[in-house]
Image (cartoon, helix red, strand yellow):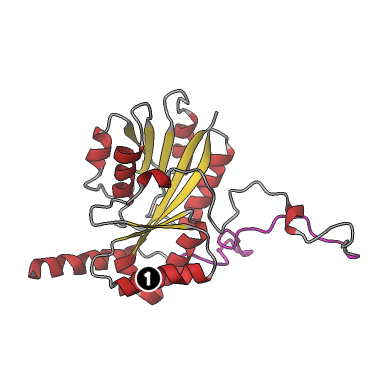
């Protein structure tokens, strides 16, 4: 039987490992064991040691998607009950999602949910530069975790939520506190697709067509499945809807916060 896997998206310092630690310690049972996959390219966080010390979890470092795929293929289903896969934030998000889809297609794991961890402080500080990145996170999210909210007015947090609610995005919102904890970590583990993207869904292209016995088109129609907009490429290989890299903005925001803390 395949192992439920949770794909965790987000920028550097957004709090992905903190959320993982919170779920491991508060939502998993004594009979569970979670493999937390994290890229060797990621900067270590204060939560790494906490996760590594958990008797029901362990880190699996991967160098690239192919290495991660091989290590996932070797997991013992009788031992591993969950996989938390932290996408490499040093690489393009679309590439990471595309590679993870290939891993899921191998059959050893199944996608349970996608957690998108949004750095609200960086979005508030650089709204024009980071809004397309936030939209991409929302497009793939089953759960949108609003993190790094210190210093961000509640009205701005409300505006983030209302933007996607007005667009009828079905994802679940969770507020992440200063300790990178959520109010109901168990709910994050529920296997329920709430994302806009259908990249991981097994859907017959015919279902996308408005056809019945009384509505059969005279002209030939294309039965190819529509590609996800963030996965589409031009003839030169470039993404038609590129996802920006906001890592530099995140670093600048952390530096700004650090200097402010020193003044207090």
Q: Which residue is mark 1?
A: 158
Q: Quadrant of residue 240 in the image?
A: bottom right
Q: How many marks?
A: 1
Would you say residue 241 sits in the magenta stretch?
Answer: yes
Task: Decide if residue 241 is on the left or right side of residue 85.
Answer: right
- The kind of secondary structure element at disc 1 is helix
Residue 126, percent from left and from top: 34, 74
- The residue range painted magenta reads 218-243
Is residue 78 among the parts visible in the rendering?
A: yes
Q: Quadrant of residue 52 in the image?
A: top left
Residue 211, percent from left and from top: 82, 59
Residue 110, percent from left and from top: 53, 39
Residue 153, percent from left and from top: 28, 73
**Image height of 190 relative to 197, above or below:** above
Quadrant of the drawing holding the C terminus: bottom left
Is residue 130 among the parts visible in the rendering?
A: no
**Image height of 76 relative to 199, above or below:** above
**At 42% from the left edge and 43% from the top edge, which residue is drawn?**
85
Q: Quadrant of residue 154 in the image?
A: bottom left
Query: Secondary structure of the magenta portion, mostly?
Result: loop
Would you say residue 95 sits in the magenta stretch?
Answer: no
């Amino acid at each position: 039987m395949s192992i439920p896997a949770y794909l965790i998206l987000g920028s550097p310092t957004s709090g992905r490992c903190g959320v993982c630690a919170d779920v491991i310690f508060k939502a998993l049972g004594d009979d569970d064991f979670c493999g937390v996959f994290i890229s060797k390219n990621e900067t270590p966080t204060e939560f790494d040691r906490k996760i590594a010390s958990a008797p029901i979890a362990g880190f699996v470092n991967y160098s690239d998607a192919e290495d991660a795929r091989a290590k996932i293929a070797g997991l013992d289903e009788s031992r591993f009950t969950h996989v938390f896969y932290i996408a490499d934030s040093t690489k393009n998000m679309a590439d990471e999602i595309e590679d993870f889809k290939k891993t899921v297609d191998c059959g050893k794991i199944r996608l349970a949910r996608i957690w998108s961890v949004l750095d609200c402080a960086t979005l508030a500080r650089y709204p024009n530069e980071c809004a397309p990145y936030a939209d991409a996170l929302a497009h793939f999210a089953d759960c949108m975790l609003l993190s790094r909210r210190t210093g961000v007015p509640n009205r701005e947090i409300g505006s983030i939520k209302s933007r996607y609610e007005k667009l009828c995005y079905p994802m679940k919102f969770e507020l992440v506190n200063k300790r990178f904890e959520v109010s109901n970590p168990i709910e994050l583990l529920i296997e329920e697709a709430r994302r806009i993207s259908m990249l991981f869904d097994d859907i017959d292209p015919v279902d996308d067509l408005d056809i019945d016995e009384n509505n059969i088109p005279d002209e030939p129609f294309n039965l190819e499945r529509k590609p996800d907009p963030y996965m589409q490429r031009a003839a030169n290989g470039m993404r038609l809807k590129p996802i920006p890299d906001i890592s530099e903005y995140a670093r600048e925001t952390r530096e700004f916060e650090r200097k402010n803390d020193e003044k207090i």
